[in-house]
Image: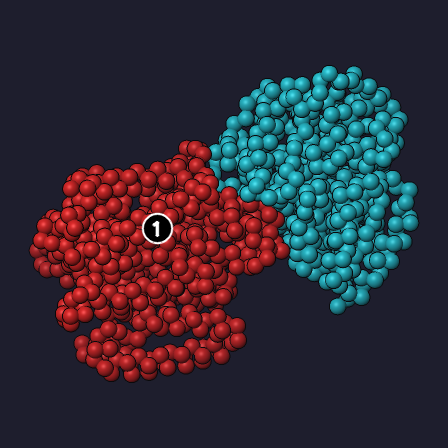
Amino acid sequence: MMTGQYDDRYRLEPQLRPAGSDADRAALMESRQRQLMADIPVRPSNIGWFEAFLAKPAIPEGAKAVGYFCQVIPLEIICAFGAVPLRIDCGNSAYVQPGEELLSADVCPLAKASFAQALSADSTAGKCACLVLPSSCDAKRKLGEVLADFRPTFTLNLPPEQDYARYGDWAAGELERMAEFFAQHLGAKLSSSALLSAVRQSQRASVLIREILTLRSASPAAMSSRDLFAIVQSSFNGAPSKEWLQNVERVRDEVAAYRPPREVKRPRVIITGAPLIWPNFKVLNLLEESGAYVVGDTICTGSQSLYDPPTFHETSRKALMRALAQRYIFASPCPCFVSQGTRMSRILDLVEENKADGVVHYGLRLCQLFDMEVYRLSRLLKERNIPFLNVHTDYSPEDSEQLRIRVEAFVETLHGRAAK
Amino acid sequence: MQSALDGVLRFLEPLTSPFLALLVCLLLPSLAVRFSGRKLALALLLLAVSFFGAYELAAASDSAHRWLIALNTPLVTVFLFVILPALHLPRNRYYKLFLLLPAALVVAGIAAIFVAYATVPDGKDGFYWLLIRPAFLMGLVASALVLVQPFLTMKVFRRAMRISLFAILIYGGFALRQDYLDYQQMLDHRAKTQGGVVALTETRPVTQNDNRMTYLPSAPCRFSADGGYVQGCNMELLQRIAMLDVAKTVGGDPAAISNMAIVLAALLMFMVIVFLTARITCGWLCPLSTMGSALDYVRRKLRLPYFKPSPAVRSGVFYSGLGLAGLTLLMAKLVPSLDANGYVLGCKIPIYPFCKICPGQQVCPVATQGLAGYPPLPSSEWAWGFFKVFTLLLLVFFLLAFIAARRLWCLFCPMGMLSGIFNRGGMFALAKASGKCNRCGACAEVCPMGIDKVRSEMQNSDVSSYDCVLCLRCVEKCPRNGCLSLTHCGRKITESRFTGKQ
């Protein structure tokens, strides 16, 4: 490898998996989720446009694609190279089993499924010129090396602490290193004016998402949180493009124009925790089907991912890289850092701002980072008398009905608070 | 008619007293918290009545009245009736009602210009810049800014304010005169090369004071050709204090005693101003920093990186500024002992020694007159070349610091150091709601003074610091709504709000 991140002497020949039954089951999971969401009473009229981007995104003719994991990779840099960013972390339970066979059963479902999906023939990752992922947890730190056998891969090192004074320049340097890697594998140059226009584009996305969140908070029935997640996640493939922004503007106008036929008081909850990746919206399905409004989230694949814009004052390449490091690394609510006050603050702030009645934590099985934070979170919320439910589960739909009983019971206890 | 007008003006005189402004600001926090609506109006009325009473009581003594008048400035009236309400009134639909007042003041200001032109003697038709009385001008500018503020982003508003104040402070000396007569006097004054002011090459120790009391925390150099529209800066005041002839004063010399009284009154006035404004004068008013920011703007537009000084360099810069200011103030202390040739202990020292090395004296004339206005350098005989070397050294540092290191100069600037004494504990404060902070560090990144406290402070809500020039760039750039805010007298004036238009 040219970047010298992995030891070339022990590279292995990639063993691709035939498409076959995995892909069929994956398609089934997706269509099942689509069906569930078709029952949502009020939906944006153009939701179909967004759904088309969720799985198997098309790469435009002649364009190169970069596959990426996680919310800490600045898509602006990929776009500035003229490439299309495609999200390759997988939320489809169909790939968990094959992933277990390839890696290990004791790795988190996200890492297993993503690896199996990447290695299946005709996968999105296979069409990418190169892949990039952050060292945001142990699984991802090692996933880069195994993926590197298959496609050129870059592991973006993250600072251990979100201390901008200490690690700001270092993190911007790591982003520069990533840009060098892209330059090698995309055969393109990074221009700072392209970077600037990409940054402006994502600022626009933030403004729109914030407007929608404010409108939804005032009138949650105007739009389902699952549709919001679908809209947000559609931007992960191709970054917030002009068409995406236009379509979101339309959604915003529809949400603003929505008038509920009658006033309904339902419990309002904030959801936090591990990434919910299409088509694994299991917890959102359960919450909404149990009669709760999900009015806010700190989920890195939900509205949180677009909530914070990159802000810049200077437009030199160095300054823009620092602005991206600030937004993607130092403002990240990921629990992979030594201390994570941002997420706690955000949860408490969301509860206050949205007058939420409770907080639901989605713990992904085998993800220690989120699990360890539940200790602090649950006690902080208890001190403040905010009801809390920890839903600990994986991708498989099998435990849905057991969870439904717990979620329904929790939502039931919130009704009293909501009526006030 | 005239006597009736004088009577009204005499009655309203307390409204121009800086002590009223101070009193109102000190009482505002408690007023704002405890009362609302009618009670607030009643409290303000009571306050006004008692202040008017106290003022008249003090004015009953002739000598006290003389001092009170000397300290009065129409700026206080503008502050009380235009700026303060604009800062504190809630922005609801009634705010538009308040805006009628500044609108009327703008109309009055424009009318005043026409009236002044109408009184130009016959046969003298022509263009004499803006003939307007200072009180009208202050009302006009403040009102215009208050009127446009709701339509501008903070960035554009700050730029508008800095440019208009720059124009007034730098070009006001000749572009803004009271009337035609005053304009002619100014032209005569200019014709007499540097008459009455101290040039860089001044050799004779003459102190010529115009006995005004209002020293601005940061100002254009009044020693430049068109200086005189406003009083000089706080360093000029400090040098005047240092140059007081203690022996003569103790000896009972009436001129020396009067000089000391004037200087001490000016110091009191300066303290009031600094308590009310803190270093917001550095960020929004100082013409030197406006010139520097223009250089900085060019660098940014060229997408060039800037030099980020380490903490050691920063404190080095700070202490060299402090050291140089201290050294030149010590020299000023020697001024009363100068002999007829300007020597003391074999060393030739100019009056106003700090001004001799300050870049303000070099860049302000260039801003008004072009390169031709650059004053000749002091020759090597002055303190064995100290003044020649440091004049050049500081000019180079001034330019380099602004071109390549944002506001590194402002860490060095003794004017700014002095203005910052009430940065904490004064009327303005920078506040942070740490629960809304996402720790991204945008505030630390955009801070032209290189302050990290706004980012790192997570316990206390007060994030003001001594170096802060209150430019509010952090508030403007903070991506979390309501996280950072500026408070005045304990009330929130503005807060961070991401709109994508910053």
- The percent coordinates of residue B408 (x first, y second) are 40, 44
- The percent coordinates of residue B321 (x first, y second) are 34, 48
In the picture, the quarter occupied by the N terminus of chain B is bottom left
Q: Dot 1, crowdedness within 10 Å: few (<14), some or many (≥20)?
A: some
Instruction: Identify the residue at image location x=17%, y=65%.
Output: B247
Q: Camera-side residue: A134 or A215?
A: A134
Circle 1 sits in a helix, a strand or a loop, which is it? helix
Instruction: Identify the residue at image location x=70%, y=37%.
Output: A136
Does residue B278 appear left or right of residue A345 in this picture?
left
* Residue A260 appears in the picture as rendered: no
Instruction: Identify the residue at image location x=33%, y=53%.
Output: B415
Q: Quadrant of residue B111?
A: bottom left
- The percent coordinates of residue A146 (x first, y second) are 76, 25
Subunit that carries the residue with mark 1 = B
Does residue A50 appear left or right of residue B269 in this picture?
right
- In the figure, the shade used to draw chain B is red
- In the figure, the shade used to draw chain A is cyan
Q: Mark 1 belongs to which amino acid? A: Leu
